[in-house]
Image (spheres, rainbow, N blue to C red):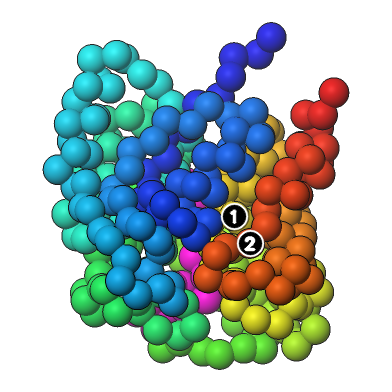
Amino acid sequence: MEKQKRVMAVHDISCFGKCSLTVALPVLSAAGVEVSVIPTAVLSTHTGGFTGYTYRDLTEDIPKIAQHWKTLNLDFDGIYTGFLGSFEQIHLVSELFDDFKGKDTLILVDPVMADNGELYKSFSPEFPQEMVKLCQKADVIVPNMTEAALLLNEPYRAGPYSKAYIDGLLKRLSGFGPQQIVLTGVYFDEENLGAAAYDRKTGDISYVLSSRIEGSYHGTGDVFASALLGAMLNGFSLSKAVRIAVNFTAGSIARTKEAKTDVRFGVNFEAGIPQFIQELGLSQ
């Protein structure tokens, strides 16, 4: 049997409200990938729409975990980062890349920091340019449209978009150094929404769109990025991995809307796991 792939996932733990590690762990596990976690913080809920939540910062634990792992001579097929709460955490994650990236390690950075045209209130205006430094070390980055504009230090533009604009964004983002860019929140009309992908090595640009479902659903970025990484580690090309991730995310949103679930609680990705496994070719 082929050696099981292993990923280091560096995210926070929101104890309620599906996002970050509570999404990454089950989705990557469903993809047959072993997940080793470095939690950056523990919250009673995520911060999107909830008040009164608890927050325990785990920044001091990150280098201690890394130091212990070094003594175990661990190797990783992937390193996956999401929400990072401070400049210090960005610096520590950058060191994790230096310490644990092997010849074939795939580094995926989801630069979680903004949405709907606005930087999250917990971040200073200088934060995006610090995130650029982390993206420079990544193989794959997965920004949404707002994050892309902030990384490039360009004004945010609301959609619908033109293909020329999206193509330009992808190529400018690749200028930081990442080999592959996946841009989410892409749409050319009000009917369809999805993602665009650019492979700098081949020059290929692909688009995967799905029927648009009205509303804003928390945690969908984590669902998408986790499914994308799971597909890539199973050997799928970038464009096919994006297709699998879009299908998985869109299905999760559709189930949640149909059930009229409180959008703060996260989307029902769990019911889509069997189909996800089938698309990856892992079902028996």
Q: Could you tell whether 233 is left or right of 176 in the image? A: right
Residue 141 colored magenta? yes
119 lies left or right of 205: left
SS at badge 1: helix
Which x, y percent locates residue 223? 59, 55
- Vertical relation: 17 (above or below) 275: below
> Which SS class for mark 2?
loop
Q: Identify the residue shown where x is 63% and y is 62%.
A: 267
State the residue position of label 2. 267
Answer above or below: position of 186 versus 205. below
Q: What residue lies at 37% left-to-right and 44% top-to-bottom?
A: 10
| Residue drawn where x is 67% and y is 89% of the image | 160
**Amino acid type, mark 2:** Val
Q: Where is residue 271 in the image (x, y as percent from the top left)?
A: 75, 49
The residue closer to the viewer here, 257 or 214, is: 257
Work out whether mark 1 precedes mark 2 in sequence or the reverse, and give the earlier one: 1
Q: Pointers 1 and 2 in contact (CB under 8 A)?
A: yes
The residue carrying pointer 1 sits among few (fewer than 14), some (14 to 19) or many (20 or more) residues within 10 Å by Cα, namely many
Residue 59 or 256: which is nearer the viewer?
Answer: 256
The magenta-colored residue range is: 138-154
Instruction: Looking at the picture, tell me which residue is in the foreground, 106 or 72.
Output: 72
Residue 22 in view in this figure: yes
Residue 153 colored in magenta in the image: yes
The amino acid beneath tag 1 is: Val
The residue sitting at 44% across, 76% down in the picture is 49
Q: How crowded is mark 2: few (under 14 residues within 10 Å), some or many (20 or more)?
A: many
Numbered tag placed on residue 223 in the rendering: 1
